[in-house]
Image (cartoon, rainbow, N blue to C red):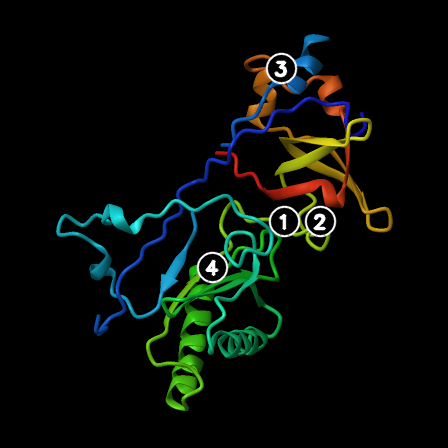
Amino acid sequence: MGLGTCSFTFYPYIPRAPLIASAKKKDSQTDPLLNPSIIQELSMDVGEDEMLIDGHEEDELLEDDGYFEDDYFAEEPEPSAGDGAGGGGVSLAGTAWDKKALEIAEEVALSFDGELGIYAFRSLLNATIQVRVERLTNKSGSPSMTDIEAFSKTYRARLDEAEASGNIPGNISLEVSSPGVERVVRIPQDLDRFKDRNLYVKYVIEVMETGSSSEHDGIFRLISYDSEANTCTWGLADVRINREKAGKGRPLSKKQKEWRLNTPFDSLRLVRFFPEI
């Protein structure tokens, strides 16, 4: 089935709450809801982030009863490719020091000899650096807590040196985390790496006759891609949200398994991991 012949309706992104905690620096002075129409149509003929915050004690993040304070949990907006956060890439606040901080971070990543890389880097106007690191040597790209701690320790030491030499201000806070369970897949460079994953895909269909467009989404698996033609071919992922539309307890039907969607790279608005629980 080609692009433009399916009928998904897009629903707003509902983020999985990440385990993110925020606190003052020590010694500081101051499941997507998918329209079932295409799945039902096919079946009628026969569905935790780890983060290390530099300079904080665990007890600082807890109330007296041992639970995280509600204020420390922030709902993230839907990621977009290159946002410097969940969507990866680099986002600089435009401060006098953030380019130097990024340069140091890249040097630290190189010191891990190809094992760790920077998935996302973001500087904030409140003198905070947020880095998401990925492990380049495993299939998921997820770093261990040991990886996160090692990168944080090495980067913090380099930042301290830069602070002492006056290259960056002395009040920088550092947050290091993993890309997350719903990490964004970068197109096309990540397609081969994550071709075996179930993926949430948001895409746009252009109607040539009217010049209008409509946004759709689904949980797909990558069948193939063509870097020269800049296109992807998708099939329905064998996940609960898709199987349930074929009938409770039933597997995907033959038509569902054979269904295909072709999308140009530039029609893909968001592709990210779909973690089925």
Badge 4 marks a residue whose secondary structure is loop
Disc on the earlier residue, 3 or 1: 1
What residue sits 56% from the left and 74% below the top?
Answer: 106
Q: Which residue is mark 3?
A: 246
What residue sits 51% from the left and 66% below the top?
Answer: 92
Q: Residue furthest top?
A: 45
Q: Kindly check if marks 3 and 2 are in contact, taking CB atoms under 8 A apart as contact.
A: no
Badge 2 marks a residue whose secondary structure is loop
Left or right of 197, for residue 49? left
Q: What separation in Å lies between label 3 and label 1 (alpha carbons)?
A: 28 Å
Q: What separation in Å lies between label 2 and label 1 (alpha carbons)?
A: 7 Å
Badge 3 amino acid: Ala
Q: Which residue is mark 4?
A: 144
What residue sits 20% from the left and 54% below the top?
Answer: 62
Disc on the earlier residue, 4 or 3: 4
64 and 113: which is toward the camera: 64
* Residue 163 against residue 179 in the figure, above or below: below
Q: Which residue is mark 2?
A: 191
Label 2: few (<14), some (14–19) or many (≥20) C-alpha neighbours in 10 Å = some
